[in-house]
Image: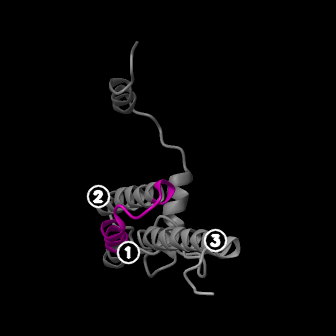
Amino acid sequence: MSTNDFSPAGAAEAALGEDAQAALFAQLILQQTNLALMLLGKTPNPQTGETTRDLEAARLFIDQLEMLEAKTRGNLTPPETRLLQQSLMTVRLAYVETVEAPAPEKPAASESAPAADSTAAAAPTPETPGDEESRKRFSKKY
């Protein structure tokens, strides 16, 4: 019996292989997306719990997703195409938001500075007529 003969068992193995490949492809896309979001500071590092901001490394993962989109164009199933496009849209938007947002400031070396800031933020500030007027200027009237 040659290897080119069709058999139901062979068809089941091929279908299982396709499902496994589709799952691995989806896992690859989600892994690249999650790493890009982590490097953009949108999700914390699962090992340390801290947020990281490395735009160059995040850009590398975004570029890899774009390369996958270009190289697989026309060869993906509709759900795979949607997953890749949605992932790219998410990381691109997160990248733009991160670039436009000011860089988070590092805490000062002295411990007294953060304590002073927290007490100042907790204290109520008296309202001045200018504050109330500026708030009114931006309210919607129907």
Q: Which mark is residue 39?
A: none
Earlier sequence position, callout 3 versus callout 2: 3
Vertical relation: 137 (above or below) 14: above
Between the C-alphas of marks 3 and 2, the distance is 52 Å
Residue in the picture at 43% in, 71% down: 36
Nearest to viewer (mark 3 / mark 1): 3
Residue designated by label 3:
11
Residue in the picture at 39% in, 21% down: 140
Determine contact: label 3, label 2, CB under 8 Å. Answer: no
Nearest to viewer (mark 3 / mark 2): 3
Front residue of 60 and 134: 60
Give the amino acid type for the residue marked by disc 1 in the picture: Phe
Give the amino acid type for the residue marked by disc 2 in the picture: Glu
Residue designated by label 1:
61
Q: Position of residue 49 (x, y in %)?
A: 59, 75
Q: Position of residue 123 (x, y in %)?
A: 55, 49
Magenta portion: prevailing SS class: helix
Vertical relation: 93 (above or below) 27: above
Between the C-alphas of marks 2 and 1, the distance is 19 Å
Earlier sequence position, callout 3 versus callout 1: 3
How many labels sit on residues?
3
Q: Position of residue 70 (x, y in %)?
A: 30, 67
Residue designated by label 2:
100
Front residue of 80 and 19: 19
Mark 1: which secondary structure? Answer: helix
Q: Which image quadrant for residue 64? A: bottom left
Mark 2, Cα crowd under 10 Å, few <14 / some 14-19 / many 20+, is: few
